[in-house]
Image (cartoon, rainbow, N blue to C red):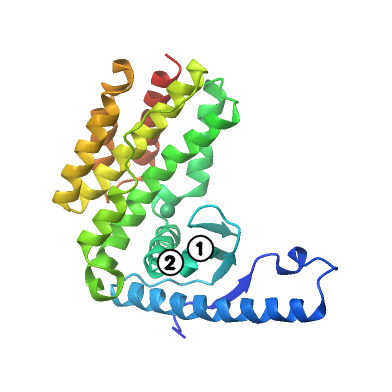
Amino acid sequence: MEQNALMWVCYDSVETEIRSSLSKRLLWEKRKEQMRRSKILNGKADNALRMMNNAGFRIKGPVRFVVDEKLPFMGYTMDQEQEHSIVVAGKALSSGMIEGLLVHELSHIYRTETNHPSHNHTLLNGVAAQIAAKSKIHARYQVKILQEIVNHVQDLYADDISFQVFAKNQTRLGSLDQIGEFFLSWTRTEPAQSRNRKMKVWLDLSVMLNNAFVISNLERHQIRHFEQEAIRANQVFLSKIDSNLSESSAHFRTFMTNLKEEISEHEFKQQLLKYMNSFIQLAVS
Ligand SMILES: [Zn+2]
């Protein structure tokens, strides 16, 4: 096991899932399977930490790796007081992408540990409080979309690290073209289907920023062929939504593409507020 970060692997809420009606044998079988999968995650986490370290991004840790069999998406990272947790979906563990996913999540942790403004929770909470005080946004889907668009910014900063690790480990993690293709698969060409006009605007804007994120990420790492394909897919999407919204696509893309590596907390906060306010202005128009 890589010695640079304390690490242990566990299963999420294993016991709560086991109903008393299950026989002891079934319980034992289930525990055995969980131990087997924990071991797999353990090995993958060790590899991912080693790749980060070799590329110059040493994680101090401790990091806790958790499998959540029922998680509907691939994975996420949680930061608590003195510990980071990476939660991966059961399906992610079985996919060929698990080490790439762990490198991405560890890159978030690297940004947090090195106190990059994009991963400074005090700063982000301050921005959220300012936005909440100024705008009347309370619906759950709206709050979720605002979290998503902040996430795009954090993902771009995390991927600036992950892509350097990917580039150094192409035989293990897949070529940059394969990674580009993976990102391209996130672009969407269809607008939202909602009879609620207000909700449709928010959902269409959410797709527009998701596409902008993909294009910007490919552009930042010069994966040109897939960037062009993502631009084409986005054009199809933009042709199907309200032109008042689509006209702003380039603005958000430019913002994401030009996010600077070296940025002070003050400047980042101002930029993030501007980005979020321009999104909200459009969404409530
Ligand atoms: Zn992420």
- Nearest to the observer: residue 260 or residue 182: 182
Mark 2 sits near ligand 1, with its Cβ under 8 Å away: no
| Mark 1 vs 2: CB contact within 8 A | yes
Between the C-alphas of marks 1 and 2, the distance is: 6 Å
Q: Which residue is mark 2?
A: 95
Q: Which residue is mark 1?
A: 91
Q: Is residue 240 above or below residue 53?
A: above
How many numbered circles does the render carry?
2
- Nearest to the observer: residue 279 or residue 269: 279
- Residue 184 at x, y percent in the picture: 28, 48
Neighbour tally class for label 2: few under 14, some 14-19, many 20 plus, Cα within 10 Å: few
Drawn side of residue 18 relative to residue 191, left or right = right
- Nearest to the observer: residue 269 or residue 180: 180
Residue found 59% across the figure and 26% down from its top: 139
- Residue 198 at x, y percent in the picture: 49, 18
Q: Amino acid at mark 1?
A: Lys
- Nearest to the observer: residue 111 or residue 43: 43
Within the image, what quadrant is residue 38 found in? Answer: bottom right
Residue found 50% across the figure and 53% down from its top: 73
Q: Amino acid at mark 2?
A: Ser
Instruction: Please indicate, yes or no, whether residue 21 appears anywhere in the rendered image.
Output: yes
- Residue 252 at x, y percent in the picture: 29, 32
Within the image, what quadrant is residue 174 found in? Answer: bottom left
Residue found 30% across the figure and 23% down from its top: 240
- Residue 262 at x, y percent in the picture: 27, 50
Disc 1 is placed on an element classified as: helix
Neighbour tally class for label 1: few under 14, some 14-19, many 20 plus, Cα within 10 Å: some
> In the drawing, what numbered circle is on residue 3?
none
